[in-house]
Amino acid sequence: MKKAVGWIVLILVIFYIGTNPGPAADIALGIGDGIAEVFRNVGTFFSELAN
């Protein structure tokens, strides 16, 4: 059952991306920016820790 739900979610995500590429790209860009910000903050933390 858990595997079937995973496949259904994957199909729905692919369908959403195919029918709404603009908003899907905005979401992906936002996620990428968030991840980049996390790594930037971790780098700043360790840089300050070393000083």
Image (spheres, grey):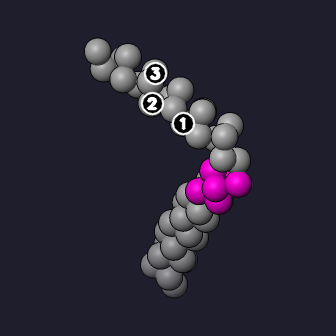
Against 24, is 7 above or below? above
Residue lying at 59% horizontally and 40% vertically, measured from the top left: 16
- Three-letter amino acid code at disc 2? Val
Q: Secondary structure at mark 1?
A: helix
Q: Say which residue label 3 marks.
A: 7
Q: Position of residue 8 (x, y in %)?
A: 44, 24
Residue lying at 54% horizontally and 77% vertically, measured from the top left: 44
Q: Secondary structure at mark 3?
A: helix
Structural distance between the alpha carbons of marks 1 and 3:
10 Å
* Contact check, label 3 and label 2, Cβ < 8 Å: yes
- Three-letter amino acid code at disc 3? Trp
Q: Secondary structure at mark 2?
A: helix
**Along the viewing direction, whichever of 23 and 42 lies nearer the viewer:** 23
Structural distance between the alpha carbons of marks 3 and 2:
5 Å
- Per the picture, the main secondary structure of the magenta-coloured stretch is helix
Q: Which residues are magenta?
A: 22-27
- Three-letter amino acid code at disc 1? Val
* Classed neighbour count for the residue bearing mark 1: other residues with Cα under 10 Å, few (<14), some (14–19), many (≥20): few
Q: Position of residue 18 (x, y in %)?
A: 68, 37
The answer to whether residue 26 is left or right of residue 11 is: right
Structural distance between the alpha carbons of marks 2 and 1:
6 Å
* Classed neighbour count for the residue bearing mark 3: other residues with Cα under 10 Å, few (<14), some (14–19), many (≥20): few
Q: Say which residue label 1 marks.
A: 13
* Contact check, label 2 and label 1, Cβ < 8 Å: yes
- Quarter where residue 26 is shown: bottom right
Against 18, is 32 above or below? below
One can see residue 39 in this view? no
Q: Say which residue label 2 marks.
A: 9
**Along the viewing direction, whichever of 41 and 24 lies nearer the viewer:** 24
